[in-house]
Amino acid sequence: MARKFTLRRRRTGRFRRRLLSLLLVAGAVGWLVGLVGFVDRIPRSADTPPEGVDAAVVLTGGSQRLIAAAGLVEEGTVSIVFVSGVGATVGKSDVVSVIRDGGGTLSERTADCCLELGHTAQDTIGNARETAAWSTQHDVRSLIVVTSNYHMPRALLELQARMPDIKLVPHAVQPSEVRLDDLIRSPGSLRLIAVEYTKYLAATARIRFSNALRSG
């Protein structure tokens, strides 16, 4: 009897280990397939923004994002740009210097009238919270979102969750150091995209769970 019980336990243990291995393999395959789809959805260039958008928000994370946002206000596409997530001691003149040092243009006069800074955000969730509060204060109904192309899916996800009634228009920036079309030969780019995709999955799960709790 004891021997039969021991054999049964061993078989059960082997079955559980095999099942766990199969689940891990299936999860890894699913993650890889999703990663490929995620890469395909990343925009390779910025579309020309439509006319009549109320404002633009740029999520800090590099001079290229700031340069792109500065171009929108200098060209008259929008009349105001909100920069979310700048350091507590950073002022408008510092932003202008970063833009100019990166090869962009933004006059001090334009910065004074058309640039507003947010100092509270520390991450993408904070960007969404900060931008939502600013948009409410300024009665914004449509918003151009400026961020790196690989970051755009998660940025839109977080922003839309906070601002479901505001139209979001993506304006993606292609970082020169991220090689989307040759990830196999660019381990750094592949690692960046893999991490970003994992963050996107986590954000999706968190937002869906939060929505389910509210609706339930």
Image (tube, rainbow, N blue to C red):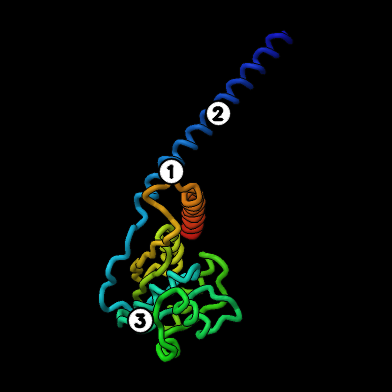
Q: Residues within 10 Å of mark 2 (few under 14, many from 20)?
A: few
Q: Which residue is mark 2?
A: 21
- Residue at 39%, 83% in the rendered image: 80
Three-letter code for the amino acid on which mark 3 is drawn: Val
Q: CA distance from mark 3 to mark 2?
A: 54 Å
Residue 125 lies, in percent from the top left, at 52, 65
Q: CA distance from mark 3 to mark 1?
A: 37 Å
Q: Residues within 10 Å of mark 1 (few under 14, many from 20)?
A: few
Is residue 109 something one can see in this rendering? Answer: yes
Q: Residues within 10 Å of mark 3 (few under 14, many from 20)?
A: many
What secondary structure is found at the residue carrying circle 1? helix
Sequence-first tag of 2 and 1: 2
- Residue at 42%, 61% in the rendered image: 176
Dot label at residue 12: none
Q: Which residue is mark 1?
A: 184
Q: Which residue is mark 3?
A: 73
Horizontal arrangement in the rendering, residue 38 relative to residue 191 (left or right): left
Horizontal arrangement in the rendering, residue 181 relative to residue 26 (left or right): left
Residue contact at pointers 3 and 2, CB within 8 angstroms:
no
Q: CA distance from mark 2 to mark 1?
A: 27 Å
Foreground residue among 90 and 160: 90
- Residue at 35%, 49% in the rendered image: 40
What secondary structure is found at the residue carrying circle 2? helix
Sequence-first tag of 3 and 2: 2
From the viewer's perspective, is the residue at label 3 or at label 2 nearer? 3
Foreground residue among 203 and 102: 102
Three-letter code for the amino acid on which mark 2 is drawn: Ser
Residue contact at pointers 2 and 1, CB within 8 angstroms:
no
Residue 212 lies, in percent from the top left, at 47, 55
Residue 98 lies, in percent from the top left, at 49, 77
Sequence-first tag of 3 and 1: 3
